[in-house]
Amino acid sequence: MKFFLLGMMGTGKSFWAKKMAKKNKSGAYDLDHLIESLEDRTISELFAEEGEAWFRQAEAKLLRWFGEKKSFVLATGGGTPCFNENMEWMNKHGITIWIDSPIELMVQRLIPEKDHRPLIRELSDAQLADFLTAKLAERTPFYQKATYHLKGDDVNEKNLMNIIKKHA
């Protein structure tokens, strides 16, 4: 089965993809890491050198490549569902799961990673929560189209494994 994990940066999508893939007996992938490997540049470098529009096209193209794969768990980038009809494509080709963590937890996880994330690199720690709140409000209409929505304490191994069992 094909599972797409979506949600804001810092929600643990990559972490949960690995756990789910082990249970699903499939591969775990991180869309941003794959793009970095293919381009031999970081996401920050790609945004700076090529621009966001170029990045979103490359992201959509790589996402579509997963249509040919049989079974996997893919952690998408936070903005992936919001561009190029990616959300509709993911829903058509697999099971989408919105990982929805509290803003405070995302801030805690993201502060040490700011240099590697182009959208938040220039923000002060104090500005980060406001930015995430605004970005989440902007992305929620896309995220709400997910097959499943796990929020707060519902983001746990038991619930994710139950989703896998339902679709096995």
Image: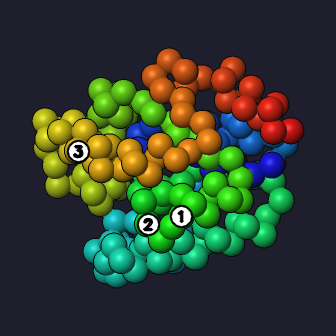
Dots 2, 3 in contact, CB < 8 A? no
The image quarter in which residue 25 lies: top right
Q: Which mark is residue 86?
A: 1
Whole-percent x, y for residue 4 in the image = 63, 50
Q: Residue at x 28, y 74 (%)?
A: 48
Q: Residue at x 67, y 29 (%)?
A: 160
Inspect the image, locate mark 3, and give the three-letter code of the amino acid beneath it: Ala
**Tally of marks:** 3
Q: Earlier in the sequence, mark 2 or mark 3?
A: 2
Q: SS for tag 2?
A: loop
Q: Position of residue 164 (x, y in %)?
A: 77, 35
Q: Is the residue under label 1 in contact with that under label 2 (CB below 8 Å)?
A: yes
Mark 2, residues whose alpha carbon is within 10 Å: few (<14), some, or many (≥20)?
Answer: some
Task: Determine which residue is flagged by label 3.
Answer: 134
The image shows residue 88 at horizontal and vertical percentages of: 57, 60
Q: CA distance from mark 2 to mark 3?
A: 17 Å
Q: Quadrant of the C terminus?
A: top right
Whole-number angstrom distance, CA of label 1 to CA of label 3 = 21 Å
Q: Is residue 66 left or right of residue 111?
A: right
Element at label 1: helix
* Amino acid type at image mark 1: Asn
Question: What residue is pinned by disc 2?
Answer: 83
Disc 2 marks a residue whose amino acid type is Phe
Q: Quadrant of residue 147?
A: top right
